Image (spheres, helix red, strand yellow):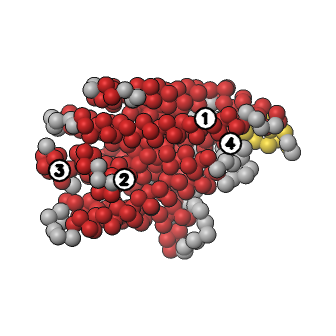
């Protein structure tokens, strides 16, 4: 086993940031694209985005050797740094999300409500795409890593962000509505299914095409990559990312009957989320497992997640628990989502 620079905590960070962007995009569809049937869970999606946005930087702070210096990106701005760009995008995105939630909850009856929310949504959709895509840009522009250096990565990060955010919205919509004993809107769920299916299809096509292109790399490069795909990442790449999180949901969600059973829709959402997390893992961890031992000679190393220590299973679990707490708090503090459901019904 060999220590690598960016471990599992860095994998959790783009997973959360992608969900935040995807959930936000789902929340503004009724406003910008007149998808009124999605209004059923528009505010729920916005609250998911808000809670996930707050959670997203936590893995980065845990990963820092001196976490108290994290605020320096705001005190000493570095506009030319792609990594510092996260701080700027994150604070803008959080302000837009928080402002929109406040307006929805306490100013929805004002004359300026619609125009203000529309303006915020226009700005927000641009920020959300940049927010989810810039991480892919950082990896896609890194020439030293064969698995990262490709223009497909930023596009795939945006697509997987949308599909993971939409999948989580669908999963929590079914779960919360059942707990609250609210009527599940099959028409709204069907519209969400279509969004998930088409976005997932595009994502699978892009990732698969990139894999096919890599098979035509020179033998010195493809040999360690093939060892990586089929041995080190065999389960997470071929099993979880492509088959469990990609092909199976595509087949099941192809049929409208899949939403007639909310349990099946929930299961497919869980599989998609597992597949997206596996994609982040395979790219970030996998990209560091192929090293250049000497000029034009590549080899692979291994990586194992421990129980304790930085990036351990307990650390990752604690981050997910913080996210669950923030979302539960948001649902209580901002109860307008229940009002919207009753008005929609």
Q: Nearer the viewer, residue 5 or 113?
A: 113
* Above or below, comparing residue 128 to residue 233 in the picture: below
Q: Residue at x 85, y 42 (%)?
A: 296
**Front one among 302 and 80:** 80
Evaluate whether residue 326 shows in this view: no
- Disc 2/disc 1 C-alpha distance (Å): 27 Å
Q: Earlier in the sequence, mark 3 or mark 1?
A: 1
Where is mark 4, residue-wise? 147
State the SS at label 2: helix
Q: Earlier in the sequence, mark 3 or mark 4?
A: 4
Pair 2/1: label in front: 1
Give residue 264's quadrant in the image: top left
- Tag 4 secondary structure: loop
The residue that mark 2 highlights is 24
Gap between marks 3 and 2, in whole Å?
A: 17 Å
Identify the mark at residue 208; answer none if there is no mark: 1
């Amino acid at each position: 086993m060999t220590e690598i620079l960016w471990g599992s905590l860095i994998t959790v960070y783009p997973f959360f940031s992608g969900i935040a962007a995807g959930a936000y995009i789902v929340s503004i569809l009724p406003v910008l694209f007149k998808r009124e049937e999605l209004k059923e869970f528009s505010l729920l999606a916005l609250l998911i985005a808000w809670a996930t946005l707050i959670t997203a930087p936590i893995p980065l702070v845990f990963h820092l050797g001196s976490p108290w210096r994290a605020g320096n990106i705001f005190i000493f701005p570095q506009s030319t740094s792609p990594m510092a760009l996260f701080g700027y995008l994150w604070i803008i995105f959080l302000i837009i999300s928080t402002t929109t939630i406040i307006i929805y909850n306490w100013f929805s009856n004002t004359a300026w409500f619609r125009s203000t929310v529309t303006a915020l949504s226009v700005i927000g959709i641009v920020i959300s795409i940049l927010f989810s895509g810039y991480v892919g840009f950082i990896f896609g522009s890194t020439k030293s890593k064969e698995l990262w250096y490709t223009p497909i990565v930023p596009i795939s990060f945006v697509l997987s962000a949308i599909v993971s955010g939409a999948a989580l919205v669908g999963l929590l919509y079914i779960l919360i509505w059942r707990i609250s004993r609210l009527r599940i809107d099959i028409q709204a769920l069907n519209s969400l299914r279509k969004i998930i299916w088409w976005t997932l299809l595009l994502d699978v096509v892009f990732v698969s095409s990139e894999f096919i292109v890599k098979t035509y790399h020179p033998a010195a490069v493809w040999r360690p990559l093939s060892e990586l795909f089929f041995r080190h990442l065999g389960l997470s790449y071929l099993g979880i990312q492509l088959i469990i999180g990609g092909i199976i949901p595509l087949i099941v969600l192809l049929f409208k009957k899949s939403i007639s059973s909310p349990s099946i829709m929930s299961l497919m959402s869980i599989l998609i989320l597992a597949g997206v997390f596996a994609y982040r893992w395979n790219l970030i961890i996998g990209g560091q497992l192929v090293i250049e031992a000497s000029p034009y000679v590549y080899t692979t190393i291994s990586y194992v997640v421990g129980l304790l220590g930085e990036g351990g299973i307990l650390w990752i679990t604690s981050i997910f628990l913080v996210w669950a707490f923030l979302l539960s708090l948001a649902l209580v503090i901002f109860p307008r989502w229940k009002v919207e459901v009753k008005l929609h019904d």
